[in-house]
Amino acid sequence: MASNAGIQVQNGLTHTHSGIAGNVLTGKIRVKNIGKKEERILLYKQDLSLSCNGSLEYSNVGNHLRSSASWIQTSVDEKVIGVNEEYDIIYTITIPDSADISGTYWNIIMVEGVDPIKEEADKGVKVSSRVRYAVQMIVDVGTFQSPQMAFENFAYKKNQAGNQTIHVQLANKGNYASKTRLTLEVYDAKGEKLKVIESQSKRLYPQKCNDFELELKDLPIGKYEGIIVADNGKDLFGANITISIQ
């Protein structure tokens, strides 16, 4: 059976740009065919919709107010790529010349591999699976302003290893996206610091939330005090929490 696994995006799945209203920006998505036969790729735009309950949805363009899909044009909508060939898809971002445009805008360019030729077998047509790459396009318009972060919820759960975890829902109250990391300092009843736990960095979009998980392992049963800090690279936002290990 033919496979589209030979198509790969070579230069990352997140492309960030910054400019001001009226600017025209350019970039490229580099695609390589590492398979054993030529492959046809299709390109199309979608919006990425997120909600504070953790759901993520790819949808038709124009489904949220901060979509940049209408700003972006690609050099091709489809292309046949030969074996071992690298091909650069050039895209152009035209930021509207409007005083009302500021903050972070985003959308998705889908790069989808499709068999260029259907192959027939004795019992019919072989159907090949399709591989899609969701390339995230992020555009910051205007002078970056560090967004206000707010801790929306804390939940305590156990993971598959049996260790207790804290699930933190963090909200971005500003107009610019920001990559943010959480740090938790754990103290005993005497005020002595026992542990420092860090999360992976995650991007928070304007007026959206993201969930973080902090694993509380190697702590004896008991109660502890914690200071949790969100660091977006510009500002720090903290909260005090009480931790109960059972």
Image (cartoon, helix red, strand yellow):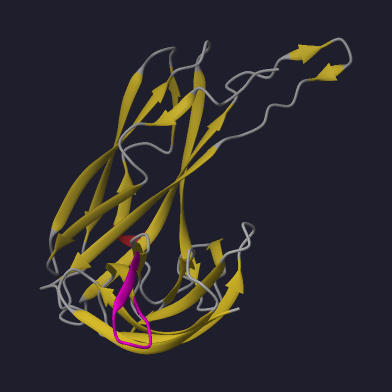
Q: Is residue 36 visible?
A: yes
Does the magenta-highlighted stretch encompass residue 51? Answer: no
Q: Is 188 located above or below residue 67 in the figure? A: below
Tell me where residue 79 sits by quadrant: top left
| Quarter of the picture holding the C terminus | bottom right
**Along the viewing direction, whichever of 5 and 39 lies nearer the viewer:** 5
Q: Residue at coordinates 37% horizontally, 45% vertically from top-left?
A: 13
| Residue drawn at the location 14% of the way across and 70% of the way down | 21
Q: Nearer the viewer, residue 219 or 108?
A: 219
The stretch of residues the image draws in magenta is 186-197
Where residue 187 sits: x, y (%)?
34, 80
Please determine whether, in this image, residue 182 is positioned above or below residue 16: below
In which quadrant of the rendered view does residue 179 lie? bottom left
Which residue: 25% across, 83% down? 237
Is 15 displayed left or right of 57 in the figure?
Answer: left
The quarter of the image holding the N terminus is top right
Residue at position x 57%, y 64% from top?
163
Nearer to us in this view, 31 or 23: 31
